Image: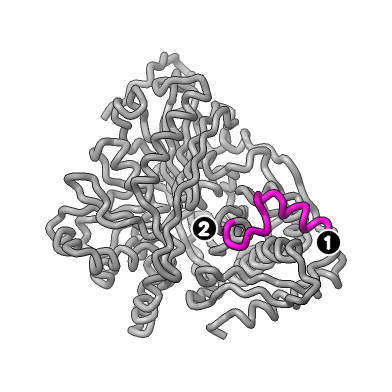
Amino acid sequence: MPLDFNVVERTGETRVPAASHVLAIDQGTTSTRSIVFDAEGKPVATAQREFTQHYPRDGWVEHDPEDIWRDVLATVKEAIEQAGLAAGDLAAIGITNQRETVVVWDKTTGEPVHRAIVWQDRRTARTCSALREAGHEELVRRKTGLLLDPYFSGTKLAWILDEVEGAREKAERGELAFGTVDSFLLWRLTGGAVHATDVTNAGRTLLYDIHAQRWDEELCALLRVPMGMLPQVHDSSHVFGTTTADLFGAPVTIGGIAGDQQAALFGQACFAPGTIKSTYGTGCFILLNTGEEAVASDHGLLTTPAYRIGGRMTYALEGSIFAAGAAIKWLRDGIGIITHASQTNDMATRIEGNHGVYMVPAFVGLGAPHWDPEARGTITGLTFDTEPAHLARAALEAVAYQTLDLIEAMVADGGSTPHAVCIDGGMAANEWLCQFLADILQLPVERPEHLETTALGAAFLAGLAVGIWPDLAALAATRSSNRRYVPAMDADVRSGLLEGWRRALGSTLTRN
């Protein structure tokens, strides 16, 4: 469909849309944000809402898709209003989302058939074990770059088809649609006109061949997923469609989609092979750009699409930590020793050392490089002298130790030691954590001026699709660093801390 951006074309000049703001929908694990960015990549308005987490059983995590949809509508409207704009003033919308979370809905009514099963959910651990024992992991690994783990979408989708009454029959009749959260939102935003996703989300389903770049019949048959349920797969920067006019007052082009961690890589302008970013949100996810080469890992990492633009794929190595900010949230909501996450900075700063207290935050198992879904969180080294500050520091320290484990695995897989690590996400606001990261990693840590680079990446992708930015060089020119942290810890102190971490980790692992 031709798009009219109300532009004036002049010979020799770049075609730029009259509207110069882009809105990013950042649909995360615990909250939904909508952020308006200007043509310089600066946020001008933000709206955010937390939503309810559902834990029906041990290791199960669910979201109500209607809660997510409600919050998307509310935050988009609020952000547009805060920015002093109308929907018609937006050049495009970009979507970034919690990956691997599964939604299945009726194609006629648009209603979900079950709550969304969240990426953290471990209910299909036995299914994954059975598939491994049957010898299927090599096939999955070769085609998808992933492991057989309940983290990924495919076995969650199969669970819904098997456990929701009538779901499999409806799916086989072509009556149900599957998608990660981006697909569900795209469907709703376009009034059911578009059922699609991008390569970064498709590549996390266990159903998509990241090398052939298509849904794979053999993988779908293995997990018993009807292919008619699957969305079309496009570039990450692509005109997917337009919102219906009734939602925001005018139709708006949807020009970009990427899973949250790939969007953060893009927002950090990590466009060159060898550049690396680490995002600290609910979990922690590290991506190393490997360019056009899909590097296979021998050390428990994932090979994943980083983004695809103009039909050209860029790949990444990824390490996943399931609980980073989630451990801080547990300190607040689970045991009540803090009332706000920012308190952990002062608590960690005011005590000398960690008092031998270590937390391994395996609340929903351990991700890379261990992949131990049966592990559960532990706190070791408790004494009568232990105080809340030691628990807060232990939760922060665990983030740094796990980050080191992942970077060491990346280097072992053949990646070069990075010159610096670009960090972002809510936890990157914690000054103590940033310095501790630099000390433990023995690498400079760079923090951008604006921490919400996940949303910025979605805005960048959408803006590229409609001409706000002409190329990657223009995007990179917008990036500015707020702070650079350099290693300062004594080598013996660091060595002692790491020794304690490895003991604590060893006591937690069930796959030794």
Q: Residue at x 45, y 55 (%)?
A: 53
Is residue 169 among the parts visible in the rendering?
yes
- Tell me the amino acid under the disc marked 1: Ile
**Which corner quadrant holds the N terminus?**
top left
Q: Is residue 433 magenta?
A: no
Of all residues, the one furthest to the left in this rendering is 173
- Is residue 319 something that shows in the picture? no
Residue depicted at 39% across the width and 45% down the height: 68
Q: Is residue 258 above or below residue 116?
A: above
Q: Secondary structure at mark 2?
A: strand
Q: Which residues are magenta?
A: 333-350
Mark 2 neighbour class, 10 Å CA radius: few under 14, some 14 to 19, many 20 or more:
many
Query: Depth-wise, is mark 1 or mark 2 nearer the camera?
Result: 1
Q: Residues within 10 Å of mark 1 (few under 14, many from 20)?
A: few
Colouring of the image: one colour
Residue corresponding to mark 2: 316
Disc 1 to disc 2, C-alpha distance: 38 Å
Give the labeled residue for mark 1: 351
Q: Position of residue 438 (x, y in %)?
A: 75, 58
